[in-house]
Image (cartoon, rainbow, N blue to C red):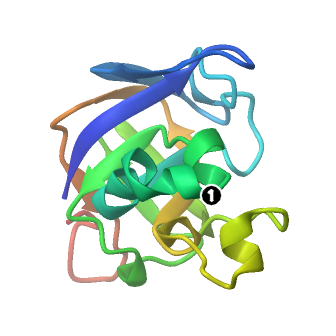
Amino acid sequence: MKVNSLFIKRKKGGNIERIEEGYFKREKGLVGDINGIGGDRQVSIATERARKYIEGEGAKGICGKRFYENITIEGLNIEKFFIGQKVIIGETIQEITHIGKRCFPECNLFILNDPCPLSKEVLFTRVLKNGIVKAGDKVGIMYYNNTDDGVR
């Protein structure tokens, strides 16, 4: 797995910008991002499938216009992750706090019972260790047992 792209939104109503690297601060999130204020959804992470959806079909629903992820990860299989799991992204260590994005009840896709991929293709994390994340950085999963060093 690797970081494919990074996004930031600096102010409410502002544009979503693609960036080459960002600094992620412990217990805050992406520095300069409108959502980098702490809480349990400090960083949003999406699969490539979700990113393609946002750029294409997503215009049919509310999220395609409102949602953006901070990090898009190539090769991310969300089914392999669980809440509380720690991941290494670039220089950072992040802990998964939520899996999937809730649908807006007023979304026409939700009303038609046609949920978008964001309900299953997005993770939210909190930053445990400060650091820079760049496009192209590797993503690792932290494991703990008596026989390995804890990182893969």
Q: Is residue 17 above or below residue 118?
A: above
Q: Position of residue 80 (x, y in %)?
A: 36, 82
Quarter of the image with the N terminus is: bottom left
Residue 42 on image: x %, y %? 65, 41
Q: Helix, strand or loop at disc 1? A: loop
Q: Which residue is depicted at the point 39% across and 38% down?
A: 92
Left/right placement of residue 18 relative to residue 114 reads left
Q: Quadrant of residue 47?
A: bottom left
Say which of 111 and 36 sits in front: 111
Considering only vertical position in the picture, is 146 above or below 127? below
The answer to whether 130 is drawn above or below residue 66 in the figure is above
Query: What residue appears at the point 34 percent right and 73 percent down from the top-left corner?
Result: 143
Identity of the residue drawn at 32% across and 63% down: 49
| Residue at horizontal 74 percent and vertical 28 percent from the top | 37
Is residue 64 visible in the rendered image? The answer is yes
Q: Which residue is mark 1?
A: 61
Quadrant including the C terminus: bottom left
Question: Dot 1, how many residues are within 10 Å of its Cα: few (below 14), some (14-19), or many (20+)?
Answer: many
